Image (cartoon, rainbow, N blue to C red):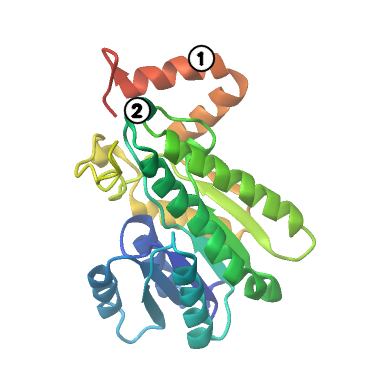
Amino acid sequence: MSYFSGKTVVITGGSEGIGKALVDTFISLDAKVATCGRNYDKLYQLQSNYAHKPLLIYTADVSKEQDCKNFIDATVKTFGSIDILINNAGISMRALFNDTDLDTVRKVMDINFWGTVYCTKFALPYIIQNKGTLAAVSSIAGYRGLPGRSGYSASKFAVNGWMEALRTELLDSGVNVIWVCPGFTTSNIRNVALDKQGKPQGESPMDEGKMMSAEECAGHIIHSIEKRKRTLVLTFTGKRTVFLNRFFPSLADKLVRKFFFKNGELVK
């Protein structure tokens, strides 16, 4: 019997990428899983893969408070309670701030930060009752601001700081709070990243084949939740970036600039 057997796990953004890999793995570990997303067709396909498993799908936009409340309420109605919440839903962007519409930054913040806040607010009483786990999938961009991703970096810095505050508030409650910062991971997030006008860019500027798979990333996240770790920073590049930014920030500025720019133009 696995550590997660019989536990109710809530995962936002579970229709693809890291979220879907988390859903797949938790179901294989005999957990009861509830997940949400904006694309019903993708959610329906996911559910059809697990017709006889305890999986709840729910169409929701996490940037909307009422959608988040309805999703959490549906989970509790279906499974009785919540043991683990993984705030995974997120969106990125790719545009220099000087060229970016403010609505683009606002949309990224609404999904990445406020979506995390909303779902946590409604799920937290159950997690406290069960001495469970509150988790957020953040990013290296939450430790180091990345050019062309100013709104994304802001949202992930906000998530990291907010989760740290919650961890301190809940220190004596028996609840574990963990934020996970993957490096570049194979997913659809770069294809749907917003451009300067707030529209999906439609293609990835990165070599997806050289990145950690979503399945491997999910495995690391689940292991860290089981071990009740505080934080998780993944990939050598991610660990190096966090280290350099902490101890050698000026050097980190130059290296990050070199990585994302070519001949003065943003290329990644």
Disc 2 marks a residue whose amino acid type is Leu
Q: Nearer the viewer, residue 205 or 200?
A: 200
Work out which residue is located at the far right of the displayed protein and give it: 172
Q: Which mark is residue 236?
A: none
Image coordinates for residue 83, horizontal then vertical, percent: 59, 73
Disc 1 versus disc 2: distance between alpha carbons? 21 Å
First in residue order: circle 1 vs circle 2: 2
Crowd band around label 1 with a 10 angstrom C-alpha radius: few (<14), some (14–19), many (20+)? few
Look at mark 2 in the image and give the residue it sits on.
96
From the viewer's perspective, tell me whether residue 234 is left or right of residue 261. Answer: right
Mark 2 falls on what kind of element? loop
Image coordinates for residue 58, horizontal then vertical, percent: 37, 75
Is residue 119 placed above or below 186 in the rendered structure?
Answer: below
* Residue at 34% in and 24% down: 260
Image coordinates for residue 38, horizontal then vertical, percent: 32, 65
Mark 1 falls on what kind of element? helix
Look at mark 1 in the image and give the residue it sits on.
251
Instruction: Look at the numbered discs 1 and 2 and tell me whether their residues touch, using CB distance below 8 Å.
Output: no
Disc 1 marks a residue whose amino acid type is Leu
* Residue at 51% in and 33% down: 239
Is residue 5 placed above or below 196 in the rendered structure?
Answer: below
From the viewer's perspective, tell me whether residue 255 is left or right of residue 202. Answer: right
- Does any portion of residue 235 appear in the rendered image? no
Q: Nearer the viewer, residue 198 or 176?
A: 198
